[in-house]
C-alpha cells in the first residue's frame, strides 16, 4: 500500500443490512440513508398534528413519527392519515408506543392499520412478567397488520432488570469491566434479545429495525459500532437528547458523522430541542445537511460562502449568501417538481479576490464581491468561465436573477413540442 492510499479517507462501504419497507420508503438493504423526524404536538390535536407532519414532510422528512400515548391519540391517528392523504402528503407515519401500546393497538385497529410502523421501547413496554408478554402482543399486532417495528432501546429507559443482572455478573469477574462498558452491553443485549423475541413470535427479519440511543457521543459511537457488528438488522441512528442549538447540532453531527463514515446507519433522526416557539423542521434540515455535506445524498443546492475577514468591506456578501440560501430553501418544494436535479447545484458567494475567483470557478455559478481597496466590481463565473462583471448598488439583485436564469436554463424541462 502506498502512502497516498493510506491517507485516502473515503467512507467505508455501507454495512449490509436487511432492507425494510416502511410505508413505501425503503430503509436499509443498500437504500440511501433515510431522513426522519418526530412531531411535538399532542397527537389528539388533529389540526396541529396534521399541520406539523405536513411541514416536516415538505421540509424533506421521509418518515414522521408521532406519539400514540392514550386512547384519544390512537383514535386521532386514522383521521390524521386521511387528512394528510387529502393534502397529497403520503409521508409514512410511525406510532411511538410506551407502556400501553399493546392495548391501544388492539383497541384501535384503524390506528394500527393507518400507521406504517410501530416503535417499541423494550424498556417501557411493561414491568416484570408483563414485559415480554406485552412486547409479544405488539409484535403480534404488527404481524396481523403486516407492519414493521422499530425496536428502539434508549438508555434513559433501559431495562433495569437486564442491567442489574449484567452488573451483578460483572462484579463476580476477577477483573470487572467498567460500569460504562456494562451499560453499553446492556443496551445492545436489550435490542438483540427483543429482536430475537420478535422473530420467535413470527415477525420476519425484513420487518425489524433496531436503534440503541444514548446521549453521549463516545458511548453512541461505541454502542452502534458493536451493535452493527453483531446484527444485520436495519439500523436507525440517532443521538438521543442531543440538546438545543449549536450543541445539539454539533453533537449529532460528530457522532453520526463518524458512524455514517464507517458505513453504519440506514436511517437517521436528529433529536434537537427546539427553541421556545422554534421551528421543528430544523431537525430535518440538520439531518439533510449532515448527509449532504458528507456526500451521501443531495437534497438542496449548496451555497459555499467564505467566512469574511478584515478584507471584507461590507456585510453585502453575508447578506447575499444568506438571501441566496434562504431563497433556495423556500423555493425547493416547487423546484423539486419544476427543476429535476436542481439539488446538485452549487453556488459560491465570496468576499474578495483572494479566494473568490477560485472558489467561484469550482461552483456552477459563483460571485466574487469586492474586498477592501479592490475595484468595486464583482466578477460572476458560470461553469468555470467568467461571464459578467457586476457593478453598482444592484449587485445582489442582479446576481439573484442570474442564479434564477441559470437554474431555468440548466434544470428546466424543455417546452413540450406543439
Ligand atoms: S475570500 Fe477574501 S474576504 Fe473571504 S475570507 Fe478569504 S480573504 Fe477574507
Image (cartoon, rainbow, N blue to C red):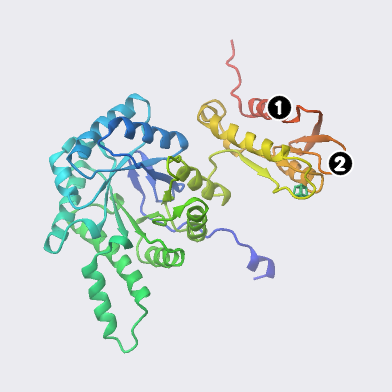
Badge 2 element: loop
Q: Residues within 10 Å of mark 1 (few under 14, many from 20)?
A: few
Q: Which residue is mark 1?
A: 397
Callout 2 crowding tier (Cα within 10 Å): few <14, some 14–19, many ≥20:
some
Residue 414 seen: yes
Identify whether 52 is placed above or below 204.
above
Give the left or right position of residue 31, taking residue 41 as reference: right
Instruction: Give above or below for 160 relative to 75.
Output: below
Give residue 249's position: percent from left, percent from top. 50, 52
User: At 16% from the left edge and 38% from the top edge, which residue is drawn?
Assistant: 108
Residue 374, numbered circle: 2
Q: Is residue 358 above or below residue 134?
A: above
Element type at mark 1: helix
Per the model, the C-alpha gap separating discs 1 and 2 is 21 Å
Q: Residue at x 42, y 49 (%)?
A: 273
Q: Say whether marks 1 and 2 touch (CB < 8 Å).
A: no
Q: Is residue 371 left or right of residue 267?
A: right
The residue most toward the top is 418
| Location of residue 90 with respect to 141 vertically, above or below | above
| Placement of the C terminus among the 4 image quadrants | top right
In the image: residue 335, left or right of residue 60: right
Q: Position of residue 115 (x, y in %)?
A: 26, 39
Out of 20 and 134, give the one closest to the viewer: 134
Front residue (pair 1, 72): 72
Q: Decide if residue 48 is on the left or right side of residue 73.
A: right
Amino acid at each position: 500500500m502506498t502512502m497516498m492510499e493510506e491517507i485516502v479517507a473515503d467512507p467505508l462501504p455501507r454495512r449490509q443490512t436487511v432492507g425494510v419497507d416502511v410505508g413505501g420508503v425503503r430503509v436499509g438493504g443498500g437504500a440511501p440513508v433515510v431522513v426522519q423526524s418526530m412531531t411535538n404536538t399532542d397527537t389528539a390535536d388533529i389540526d396541529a398534528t396534521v399541520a406539523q407532519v405536513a411541514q416536516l414532510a415538505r421540509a424533506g422528512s421521509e418518515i414522521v413519527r408521532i406519539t400514540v400515548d392514550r386512547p384519544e391519540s390512537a383514535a386521532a391517528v386514522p383521521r390524521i392519515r386521511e387528512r394528510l392523504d387529502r393534502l397529497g402528503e403520503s409521508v409514512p407515519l410511525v406510532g411511538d408506543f410506551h407502556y400501553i401500546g399493546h392495548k391501544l393497538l388492539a383497541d384501535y385497529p384503524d390506528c394500527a392499520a393507518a400507521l406504517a410502523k410501530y416503535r417499541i421501547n423494550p424498556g417501557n413496554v411493561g414491568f416484570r412478567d408483563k414485559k415480554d408478554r406485552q412486547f409479544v402482543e405488539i409484535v403480534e399486532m404488527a404481524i396481523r397488520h403486516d407492519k414493521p417495528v422499530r425496536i428502539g432501546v434508549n438508555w434513559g429507559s433501559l431495562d433495569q432488570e437486564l442491567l442489574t443482572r449484567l452488573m451483578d455478573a460483572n462484579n463476580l469477574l476477577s477483573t470487572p469491566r467498567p460500569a460504562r462498558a456494562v451499560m453499553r452491553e446492556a443496551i445492545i443485549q436489550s435490542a438483540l434479545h427483543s429482536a430475537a423475541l420478535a422473530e420467535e413470535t413470527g415477525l420476519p427479519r425484513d420487518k425489524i429495525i433496531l436503534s440503541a440511543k444514548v446521549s453521549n457521543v463516545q458511548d453512541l459511537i461505541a454502542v452502534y459500532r458493536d451493535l452493527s457488528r453483531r446484527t444485520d438488522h436495519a439500523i436507525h441512528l440517532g443521538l438521543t437528547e442531543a440538546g438545543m442549538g449549536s450543541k445539539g447540532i454539533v453533537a449529532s453531527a460528530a457522532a453520526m458523522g463518524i458512524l455514517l463514515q464507517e458505513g453504519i446507519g440506514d436511517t437517521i433522526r436528529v433529536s434537537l430541542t427546539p427553541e421556545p416557539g422554534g421551528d421543528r423542521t430544523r431537525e430535518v434540515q440538520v439531518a439533510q445537511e449532515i448527509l449532504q455535506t458528507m456526500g451521501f445524498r443531495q437534497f438542496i443546492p449548496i451555497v459555499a460562502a467564505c467566512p469574511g475577514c478584515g478584507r471584507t468591506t461590507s456585510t453585502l456578501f453575508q447578506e447575499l449568501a444568506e438571501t441566496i440560501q434562504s431563497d433556495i430553501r423556500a423555493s425547493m418544494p416547487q423546484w423539486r417538481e419544476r427543476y429535476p436535479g436542481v439539488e446538485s447545484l452549487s453556488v459560491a458567494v465570496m468576499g474578495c479576490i483572494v479566494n473568490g475567483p477560485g472558489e467561484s470557478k469550482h461552483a456552477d455559478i459563483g460571485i466574487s464581491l469586492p474586498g477592501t481597496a479592490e475595484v468595486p466590481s464583482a466578477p460572476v463565473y458560470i461553469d468555470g468561465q467568467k461571464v459578467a462583471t457586476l457593478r453598482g448598488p444592484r449587485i445582489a439583485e442582479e446576481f439573484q436573477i442570474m442564479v434564477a436564469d441559470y437554474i431555468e436554463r440548466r434544470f428546466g424541462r424543455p417546452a413540450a413540442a406543439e
